[in-house]
Image (cartoon, rainbow, N blue to C red):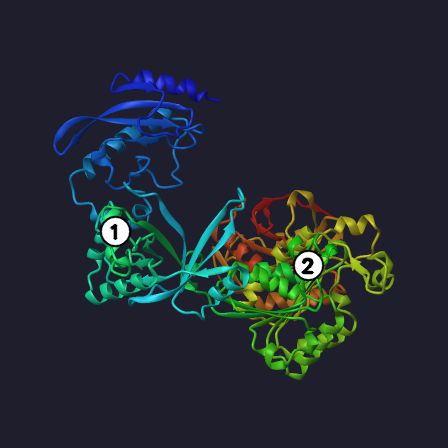
Amino acid sequence: MLDYKVALDVCLDKLSIEYDIEKVDCIPQLRSIPDTCIWKVLIPALVSGRAEDVETYILFPDDFPYSMPYIIIQDDRFRYLPHISVKSRKLCLYEDGAVYDAENIEGLIRENITKTRRWIEYYYGRDNSGEYIREIKNYWEEQYDGETGIDDNWILLGDIPIETCEMVGIAYVNKKIKNGRMNVMNVVASSEGNKTLEYIKSQHKVYEIPVLYITSLEISDMPPFSMTGQELIDKIDDDNDKQIFKKILNRYGKVNVLFPIGLDYAVGGIYIHDLKVNRNGYRKGILTSFNVLTSFENKNKKLERLYVSAYSNHRIAERTAGEIMKERRFLIAGLGSVGSNLCYYLNGYNNATFSLIDRDWLTVDNLGRHLLGFEYINQHKSYAVAHYLQQYRPDREVKAQTKNLQQLKDEEINSSCALFVCTGDVMSEKWLIKKMAEGSVRKPAFILWLEPYGISGIMIYVNPNDGGSIKRLIDKVNDNFIEFCLIKQDEYINGEKLTQHDAGCNGGYALYSANDVTMFLSAMFPIIDQLLEQPSESICYRWVGNIKIAVEKKYQSREIVRYVKKYFAKTSSINIVDYHFEIKQEVVEALKNNAQYEGYEICGVLTGSQVGENRYRISKISPPCVKKHTRCGCERDATIANKFIEEDYEQSEHTRFYIGEWHTHPENNPRPSFVDYSSIKSTYQTASLVVPFLFMIIVGTQAFHVNVYDGNRFVEVNLEIV
């Protein structure tokens, strides 16, 4: 590996031939400088048409060259130019995240010197007001002469006012997590009824602060942006606003003045305080705060500036999805390990509201796999999760109830866009299916649970408009949905093997880890997202998890297969190299018989079965399922293909299932095209898969090409012929 300190010395020798460069120990006027290599370079540049050598410092940080060197110019002529820090005098020549060749150290240093020269020649002596307007946030947050700093511990709730107005302001103290230091946060809103404001008041001891927003106060076009009291008054363009400012200041003796700075996500501000109106030589009441602001010791005193970030649904959406998402109202029944962690995923929708239902308390025993931690012990789960969600977004509507699902009124359920049942309680599920069959519950429902030891996870999606499936689900819920479980019914009859028990009648619990919950929900949530946007027929998905545990404990489990028109199972992603694949001899012969020696491409589907742990066999090939085709293309007919898959599933007594696609190419040794890859990827995302992979077999005139896609990559495999 290259020794960068040696490389820097070599570069110094080479560049010294062209530039006046020397190593130095410090940079004048800068106090806190890391103990690292510093060069002083005289960079030749045209300054207002005159050739000059501009004294520049290049500081190489410890992680150079994987971080850019710092370019520092102390010359006061350049301090207020764009892209230079007024305080540190550090130049910003590259965008954050710039990518460059870290091995080419000499080239990197040369480029920095060249960019510095161009920066001087371009910006010095010209009107740069447009630059300041475009990047006003950076320049407003700079610290200018006579200032103690910029207070950015400010938040404006809701939209920025469009008229001059007195605002509601509160301040509270919180503690810095890093060092425990106390910090004052300031929050302002247009009205008392703001939800976030009310939330903060409920969580902190607050005190009121006077705040005035002035729309007609116009800041300078260019830095410095510091100002005295008189300069502040002069910048208020409207006489009526000046009178309002004078009235508020004299009333309170201090005030936080906010005003626009050209941004739709922040405003600027000035804090006016410590105005002594009682002075020797003046009668009490003669001097007002407004008088003192522009006289005595305040005449030339720079006021403390503020930077106030706007917090609104629009701003959060702008910085995340780019837009406010469709409004979604979620009802979650059961806030245990699955339900609470599901809330974490649902919270990603930037326009969601929640109704949370659970009667239980969070105990020490729950902490291992619950969303919440130690601070919430002995709190009601529904209220604790509600607190978590509101802490994240205080303006979000969250309702908590300590009830069972069965105690809710129909209209409350139907006001949601979707219902998630994570109770693990069969009686709740029976009640729900019965209400949906009656037509009382008219919103889609998701029923989720994990089997013991995380051997599998089940999600049943129930579409209220799919009456046929709901009728069938009545029988299945009466059988505890055992048909959808991976573990066979006989094992559940002997429940002692699958559950643990503490003392007491309510001490039973199933073993599975927080990691199992995360893996299960991360597999299900993309499906939930799709079903919320595009409802389908009622359907069941199964995530297959810790199969090895089932084998080790000798639990009887079903074949990893389930495909029915209205519901099916889906497994998790796998590592292809851990699996063994076979193909029956008659399938090979059937594929050969379809080889495209002439004419158009043909295509179809493959079915297969699991024949052992991590062993899968391609057992049957469909007849051609062609909707339309050309010599070099084939569109499969989904109706014909699905009919073949369903009939083969029934004929095999539920042991064979859809496992892949086949089509022909008019070439000896076929290779997949871009269209082939795209088609398999699309099918993987949308098809009713039993296993998390999909075969692609391309039949050539002399050979086959066999690929397996696992959702992440294509792997070329060899099939054992049996």
In front here: 304 or 99? 304
Indicate the secondary structure of the residue bearing disc 1.
helix
Q: Which residue is mark 1?
A: 133
Q: What's the residue type where badge 1 is placed?
A: Ile
Q: Is residue 414 left or right of residue 428?
A: left
Residue 584 visible to an observer of this rendering: no
Instruction: Judge by depth and name the residue closer to the eye, 382 or 479.
Output: 382
Rendering coords of residue 117 (x, y %): 23, 31
**Horizontal and vertical percent for residue 181?**
51, 44
- For the residues carrying marks 2 and 1, which lies nearer the camera in this image? 1
Mark 2 crowdedness (10 Å alpha carbons): few <14, some 14-19, many ≥20: many
Residue 718 placement: quadrant: top right
Left or right: residue 228 versus residue 659 is left
First in sequence: mark 2 vs mark 1: 1
Outermost residue toward the left?
A: 49
* Residue at the image point whose x is 70% and y is 64% from the top: 648
- Left or right of 103? Residue 608 is right
583, 173: nearer the viewer: 173
Q: Residues within 10 Å of mark 1 (few under 14, many from 20)?
A: some
Pointers 2 and 1 in contact (CB under 8 A)? no
**Front one among 145 and 230:** 230
Secondary structure under badge 2? Answer: helix
Residue at left offset 35%, top offset 52%: 307
**Percent x, y of residue 175:** 52, 49
Residue placed under numbered mark 2 in the picture: 337
Q: For residue 25, which quarter of the picture?
A: top left
User: In the image, residue 466 lies at what x, y percent?
Assistant: 62, 77
